[in-house]
Amino acid sequence: MTPALALRAVTKQYGTLTAVDSFSLEVARGTIFALLGPNGAGKTTIIRILTTLLRPTAGTALVEGLDVQREGKQVRQLIGVVPQENNLDRYLTCRENLVMQARLHGMRPAETARRIDELLDLVGLTGRQHDFPDTFSGGMQRRLVVARALVHHPKVLFLDEPTTGLDPQSRRAVWEYIESLKDSMTIFLTTHYMDEADSLCDRIVIMDHGRALVDGTAAQLKERMSRAHIYELQFRGGADRYEELLRSLPFIRSLQRTGETFRLCLSGEESLKPLMDAIGTGDIRKICLQEPSLEDVFIELTGREVRE
Ligand SMILES: Nc1ncnc2c1ncn2[C@@H]1O[C@H](COP(=O)(O)OP(=O)(O)OP(=O)(O)O)[C@@H](O)[C@H]1O
Ligand SMILES: [Mg+2]
């Protein structure tokens, strides 16, 4: 069967910078696929290539078997896109933005009205449909962009950070809707919310510097960490001092801090005793073994330093 998406050795260069580096991938129809990676990893560049907005420097990209460079027009009929930046038409009302999308895709007026009512209801914007997007909050604009991407019943939906800036209620509403679409289309999304990828996606690729690092289900990716020992460690006080100490210990593979609490990954069980010897027990409020999360896998693979 033709895969919904295929990238064959796709490279994109901006001058001397290689944003996407000979990247290959096939995504089967009906998959909810997540592409994860730190800022600047190359995720948006890949989406822009697949959605015909950017020509690759080398390689081939296919959507439903159609070449994005030679058959761009047909590809655009099949896809819905939620770009990373909201790109609504600010001179059209909320509803008119949706009507415009339907016209661009040659939908009949009768069908259009029904579809738009349904989508407005879904994203909770029925009451604001005659207002202009400039008068919307960031989250409301985001919901409108999601609705617009769905107007013409796309076969493949691209969502570049669909839930960034949404409140928890709206995020859940978008997740539930993405899940309900699962059988009718292929979904390709990027997100920085690891819990979102974990609970929503059938398959995850983590990339960095234009290349894929791992590929599998959330469970398979976490399984990679099964031999790592992750502990949550909470101090009564003096966390700054302990942070310095913890960072100097060679058997701590990674360390994340939230307030007085640390999440640390030891290279093995045998490191627990030297850890306790180094910090002493006086200031410890709590220490417990944790299940590895997708975020642990992400940090382990892509490091701690902040990008760009
Ligand atoms: N138009 C451009 N000109 C030059 N360099 C660019 C351009 N667009 C992107 N880049 C560079 O390409 C690399 C990949 O960018 P891209 O936007 O694909 O990253 P990303 O994974 O989507 O990151 P983020 O999580 O921040 O959205 C970055 O180093 C970025 O600076
Ligand atoms: Mg991006």
Image (cartoon, helix red, strand yellow):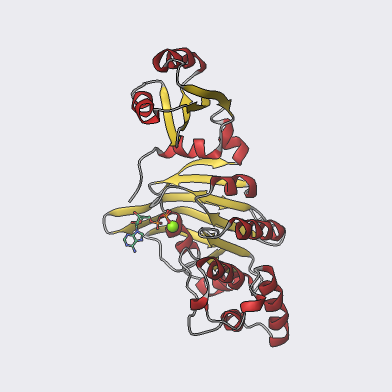
Residue 79, above or below 302:
below
Counting from the top left corner in percent of width and height, residue 68 is at 50, 66
**Left or right for 118, reference 209:** right
Task: Dividing the image into four quarters, tell me where ligand 1 lies.
Answer: bottom left
Identify the image quadrant of residue 176. bottom right
Q: How many marks?
A: 0
**Left or right for 97, reference 111:** left
Residue at point 48%, 69% (across, down): 86
Counting from the top left corner in percent of width and height, residue 3 is at 61, 56
Residue at point 51%, 50% (across, down): 35
Of residues 3 and 101, the one nearer the viewer is 101
Residue 227: tell me if it is visible: no
Counting from the top left corner in percent of width and height, residue 182 is at 69, 57
Residue at point 33%, 23% (across, down): 248
Of residues 167 and 163, the one nearer the viewer is 167
Q: Quadrant of the N terminus?
A: bottom right
Residue 138: tell me if it is visible: yes
Identify the image quadrant of residue 189. bottom right
Of residues 218 and 97, the one nearer the viewer is 97
Counting from the top left corner in percent of width and height, residue 122 is at 69, 68
Of residues 247 and 221, the one nearer the viewer is 247
Residue 212, above or below 86:
above
Q: In the orientation shown, which residue stands out farthest toward the bottom?
A: 109
